[in-house]
Image (cartoon, helix red, strand yellow):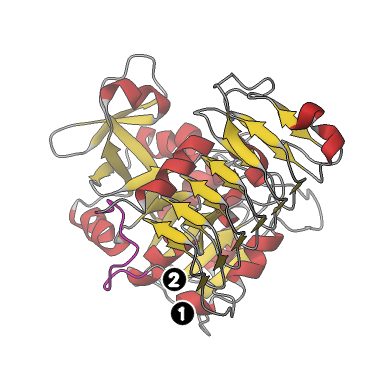
Amino acid sequence: MIKKEMIAMLLAGGQGSRLGVLTAKVAKPAVAFGGKYRIIDFPLSNCINSGVDTVGVLTQYQPLRLNTHIGIGIPWDLDRNIGGVSVLPPYEKSKDTEWYTGTANAIYQNIEYMDSFNPDYVLILSGDHIYKMDYEVMLDYHKEKGAEVTLAAMPVPLEEAKRFGILITDEDRKINDFEEKPENPRSNLASMGIYIFNWKTLKEALIANASQPSLDFGKHVIPYCHGNGAPCYAYEFNGYWKDVGTLNSYWEANMELIDIVPEFNLYEEYWKIYTKSDVLPPQYISADSEIEKCIIGEGSQIYGKVYNSVIGCGVTIGEGTVVRDSIIMNHAEIGAGCELNKAIIAEQVQIGDNVKLGVGEEVENETDPHIYNHGLVAIGEKSVVPSNVSVGKNSVVSGITAAEDYPDNYLPSGKTLVKAGDKA
């Protein structure tokens, strides 16, 4: 019989609606990050670096790119005969076919998969955070404490604590109480959505709560375990951890990669981040170009000037174009004579010549001010922006647009331009 000490279940089904047009056509864990990676590469690389060689990836929303990216797990050395990586979408059953309705419901629907490895422990991960963490150290802590449930947690500033699930513990880090996004937090220890369960404890909790609508770990499973006397502990993590759930935090996390001394280092020898790399030629940097403090992906051709930006793979930046503080994802084409300031350009976008992005005053976005803010300009995947137009700040463009969509060749700050069939 197969026996694995610990297997991982990676929740990667989320839409990530606060990323706006970046996730209109792709699941959040598959969004490009850091020039050549996708967000899911970070937890997957953590697994292989921590010696966890059996990972179930639960997909749901727009899974195609995620499935293609993961494949059979070769880049992460997860193409194993026993274990390895398995993509687990919701599937048709003889009766009661249902989508995954909550984080724990997705795990519940895959009890059979987990049982097949007869694990002692199950590690639950989220597919949309940027961090490096040794799960083996967390497992050692879990065993040492005699815990049945261990939650990774990190201290956050008290004024931000109301955005998180908060853990109240004793001096031994045993959890006494939970508060989900409390108005007046009693602690600043925030749950990171990373859990280790004894398999027996998890299985029993999932079955007991199966009928809950939108079965969730924070709301149902963990309180159930705690209420039934299962020892629950907080494992404090003090490394770099970023939830790239909003456009601004996504932009910030990319910009932090190019700091002179980056807080999050992609270049460490002993903790590599693995990804599926396309076979691309090397970068080409022309004689007239200027590049300062940037990440430039393979196969990109730079003829203009690029400062403090993260450029993906296979990107073209035309002559006389100046790019500042921007993220340009794979296979985007930027014409000649353009100016880009604080722009996030999704994959396979085409931008004409003499286009200016991020000009003028900051004005609140007219449709989704909670998404498009901080002066950023977002251009959705496969969009086309015609030549000779200017676009203001806190704005969004998605779809194949033409000159007539820009009265006086200008889309003012705070505007949303989404062509039929696309969604912002």
Q: Provide the secondary structure element on which disc 1 rests.
A: loop
Dividing the picture into quadrants, the one containing residue 113 is: bottom right
Q: Tell me residue 79's x, y (percent).
A: 53, 81
Most frequent secondary structure within the magenta stretch: loop
Is residue 37 found inside the magenta-colored segment of the image?
Answer: no
Q: Tell me residue 224's x, y (percent).
A: 43, 36
Dividing the picture into quadrants, the one containing residue 58 is: bottom right
| Amino acid, disc 2 | Tyr
Closer to us: mark 2 or mark 1? 2
Quarter occupied by the C terminus: top right
Give the camera-side residue of 220 and 293: 293
Q: Tell me residue 342's x, y (percent).
A: 51, 39
Residue, disc 2: 274
Query: Which residue lies most toward the top here?
Result: 184
Q: Mark 1 Cα within 10 Å, few/some/many (few <14, many 20+)?
A: some
Q: Is residue 133 left or right of residue 400?
A: left
Q: Which residues are magenta?
A: 261-272
Query: Disc 2 vs disc 1: Cβ atoms closer than 8 Å?
Result: yes
Give the camera-side residue of 204 and 106: 106
Q: Provide the secondary structure element on which disc 2 rests.
A: loop
| Amino acid, disc 1 | Asp
